[in-house]
């Protein structure tokens, strides 16, 4: 029996994690769940899974405290670092799934590693902004990181969980998002609804917008460099519209291994939860005879400059990834709330990144200060671009 904490249990990743757990009731016990606003869904999850510890924002705390006996469910503040630390460091916790979106995942991720827990991150932003710190803590506390993000899971599976120095490089595949076949001249007219219509994956809104700009793939380049100890030049992004190959590794002798599967996050989630075991899944299978063909293209950096910007930031590193991420979170939020056009996301992020004076080998405080500075700068630029 593995005891599981799910951070962000009310999001797409959290809900899918619970679906996987439903398949194996004798293997997993849910001991902790967290949400941000969605108290109604968290309430349902508490009733179904009986976790001993939960966390949510202040309004949600009031709501839940009226419904549950405090001797049975400990209700914490999701915005308090100490409260989240208390949940992820509980003695009986075996694995912490990080399904929170954004850099808010950084502290919970760190706390879990520091208490030697296995961490299964779907969240990529924490690794983007502080990959060097998280990887060092993972090593220091012998706390394994088993990625859930599908591309990183694919690479992890091809390497069977080891960092392999006979690796020549990796191919990170990208379906191309909602705009692969939409001309750039149309970008300024695209609505939130059109952008959220991802052809292959059903995900939260923020990551779906990042998939349309290909910023998501840029984040994954940074994430992969940290997770698998690679230089930026060892990572090749390949557009693969069918999204059947979730990524590939190439060894120095020219052999390439790929992981294939349907586009369903329950696959990498189940792998992370059961690793090093594999259990039967009830998911649909690939029918190669229906597939007919698999296509591959070079990314169009002119059409998707966010990818080029993220790769440049990956090379320069320092506090720039934190600035890139924070400015992107602000710009995407402005687009989702219809304050700016889709085509303004990149120029806003680029402007903030260009203005930043990066600090090399940053400590947590440097990263948080850069994050704060970038949000303020982005908000200033956004207010001048409001449509
Ligand atoms: N969805 C996917 O298929 C997928 C695939 C690969 C990687 N990822 C990564 O996984 C992460 C989660 O993605 P998602 O699509 O599941 O996002 P989502 O559907 O937006 O869910 C986010 C979760 O985090 C909670 N949350 C939001 N802001 C928070 C904050 N400031 N502090 C604490 N909790 C907060 C939300 O609570 P409320 O519901 O209460 O607001 C929700 O439970 C992202 O980093 C994303 O890039 C997702």
Image (spheres, grey):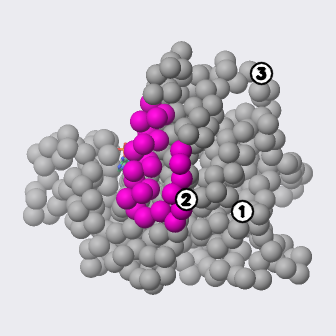
Residue at x-position 14% and y-position 53%: 68
Quick one: label 1 or label 3, which is nearer the N terminus?
3
Residue at x-position 54% and y-position 20%: 385
The answer to whether the beta carbon of the residue marked 1 is less than 8 Å from any atom of ligand 1 is: no
Q: Secondary structure at mark 2?
A: loop
The disc at residue 318 is: 2
- Within-10-Å neighbours for mark 1: few <14, some 14–19, many 20+: some
Q: Is residue 223 visible?
A: yes
Asked if the stretch drawn in magenta spans residue 357, the answer is yes
Point out residue 145 in the picture as x, y percentages from the top left corner. 51, 73
Work out how far the residue at label 3 is from the one at label 2, CA to CA, in angstroms: 34 Å
Q: Is residue 353 left or right of residue 72?
A: right
Dominant secondary structure of the magenta stretch?
Answer: helix
Work out how far the residue at label 1 is from the one at label 3, CA to CA, in angstroms: 30 Å
Residue at far top of view: 387
Please tell me which residue lies in front, 335 or 93. Answer: 335
Asked if the stretch drawn in magenta spans residue 316, the answer is no
The disc at residue 185 is: 3
Q: Which residues are magenta?
A: 356-379
Residue 131, compared with residue 158, is above or below; it is above
Residue at x-position 29% and y-position 73%: 89
Residue 166, compared with residue 291, is above or below; it is below
Work out how far the residue at label 2 is from the one at label 1, CA to CA, in angstroms: 14 Å
């Amino acid at each position: 029996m593995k005891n599981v904490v799910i951070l962000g249990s009310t999001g797409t990743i959290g809900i899918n994690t619970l679906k996987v757990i439903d398949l194996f009731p004798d293997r997993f016990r849910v001991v902790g769940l967290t949400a941000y606003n969605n108290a109604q869904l968290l309430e349902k999850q508490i009733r179904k899974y009986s976790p001993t510890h939960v966390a949510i924002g202040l309004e949600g705390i009031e709501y839940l405290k009226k419904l549950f006996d405090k001797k049975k469910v400990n209700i914490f503040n999701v915005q308090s670092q100490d409260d989240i630390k208390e949940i992820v460091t509980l003695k009986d916790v075996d694995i912490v799934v990080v399904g929170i979106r954004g850099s808010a995942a950084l502290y919970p991720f760190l706390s879990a590693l520091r208490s030697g827990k296995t961490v299964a991150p779907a969240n990529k932003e924490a690794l983007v902004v502080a990959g060097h710190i998280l990887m060092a803590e993972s090593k220091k506390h012998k706390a394994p990181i088993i990625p859930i993000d599908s591309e990183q899971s694919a690479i992890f599976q091809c390497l069977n969980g080891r960092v392999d120095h006979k690796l020549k490089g990796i191919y990170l595949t990208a379906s191309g998002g909602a705009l692969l076949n939409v001309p750039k001249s149309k970008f300024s007219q695209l609505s939130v609804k059109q952008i959220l219509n991802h052809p292959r994956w059903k995900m939260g809104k923020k990551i779906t917008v990042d998939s349309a700009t290909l910023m998501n793939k840029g984040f994954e380049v940074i994430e992969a460099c940290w997770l698998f100890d690679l230089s930026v030049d060892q990572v090749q992004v390949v557009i693969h519209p069918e999204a059947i190959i979730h990524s590939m590794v190439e060894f120095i002798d020219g052999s390439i291994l790929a992981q294939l599967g349907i586009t369903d996050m329950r696959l990498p989630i189940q792998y992370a939860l059961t690793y090093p075991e594999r259990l039967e899944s009830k998911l649909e299978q690939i029918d190669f005879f229906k597939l007919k063909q698999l296509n591959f293209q070079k990314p169009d950096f002119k059409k998707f400059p966010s990818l080029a910007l993220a790769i440049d930031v990956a090379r320069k590193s320092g506090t720039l990834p934190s600035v890139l991420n924070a400015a992107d979170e602000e710009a995407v939020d402005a687009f989702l709330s219809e304050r700016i056009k889709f085509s303004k996301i990149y120029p806003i992020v680029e402007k903030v990144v260009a203005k930043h004076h990066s600090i090399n080998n940053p400590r947590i405080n440097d990263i948080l200060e850069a994050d704060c500075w970038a949000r303020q700068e982005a908000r200033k630029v956004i207010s001048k671009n409001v449509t």
